Image (spheres, rainbow, N blue to C red):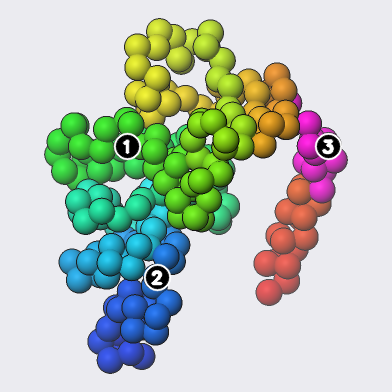
Amino acid sequence: GEMQLVANRHGGRTPIQVLADTNLLHRSVLAHGVHLSDADISLIANNSATVVHCPASNFKLASGIARILDLQQAGVNIALGTDGPASGNDIDLWIAIRLAGYMQKTAAKNPAVLPALDLVRMATINGARALQLDHMIGSLEVGKQADLIVLDADSPSLTPTFDPHTTIATCVTRADVLHVVVDGKLVVKDRRCLTINHQAAITAVKALGKQVLASVNNN
């Protein structure tokens, strides 16, 4: 695997140690971070790097369970991701939020760890921090860009709502999204994307799928 390959090529060091030794770790955005030693976690924290947790991909590929709680304890910024369609499939961040919580609670055998508010922050402001854009986006504050997701408050899966953070972390699916506003511009209205031709995109992707399948069969 990757860990052994890097160790063989770099005198037994881990990928994180190699990045640190080559001055590439500072403020880096690190995908997955599944196989981290205590020393790796310290290096990540000391270099203000971010770990982007991709639980759906980690589950599908049986990669392991990221040490999210240990990273939190060390003060590391943790964001959420989906990985690509090959391992993340439907690249749905709502699923990532839910799986991240379930995974850590199960691993710790403690339902109280990684509470809903932490998960919501991982999906929003922490991602902005990873990109060093948290002064512009990632939360609803005066002076920041108006990035909004409007959920269907009458959706059966969201009714009743007692705590918004818990609802977001455990109940919301993309079917519950009514409107999306990006930097003040309405891009999804009544569940319909306004920026692309839906049918044309579906047709084009189906054609690409046939090309990919043909390429695989030919090889």
Residue at disc 2, secondary structure = loop
Q: Is residue 29 left or right of residue 8?
A: right
Is 147 contained in the magenta span? no
Residue 143 screen position, x and y as percent? 57, 35
Residue 179 screen position, x and y as percent? 65, 23
- The three-letter code of the residue at mark 3 reads Asn
Instruction: Please tell me which residue lies in front, 142 or 89.
Output: 142
The reply to whether callout 2 and callout 3 are in contact (CB within 8 Å) is no
- CA neighbours of label 3 inside 10 A, class few (<14), some (14 to 19), many (20+): few
Q: Which residue is mark 1?
A: 118
**Residue most extreme to the front:** 143
Looking at the rendered image, the disc whose residue lies closer to the viewer, 3 or 1, is: 1
- The magenta span reads 192-204
- CA neighbours of label 1 inside 10 A, class few (<14), some (14 to 19), many (20+): some
Would you place residue 150 above or below residue 181 in this image?
above
Residue located 35% across and 23% down the image: 166
Q: Which residue is mark 3?
A: 197
Q: Which residue is mark 2?
A: 26
| Picture quadrant of residue 200 | top right
Instruction: Please tell me which residue lies in front, 46 or 166.
Output: 46
Query: Marks 2 and 3, Cα distance to the nearest angstrom?
Result: 40 Å
Would you place residue 125 above or below residue 23 in this image?
above
Residue at disc 3, secondary structure = loop
Residue 60 visible to an observer of this rendering: no
Residue 51 screen position, x and y as percent? 37, 57
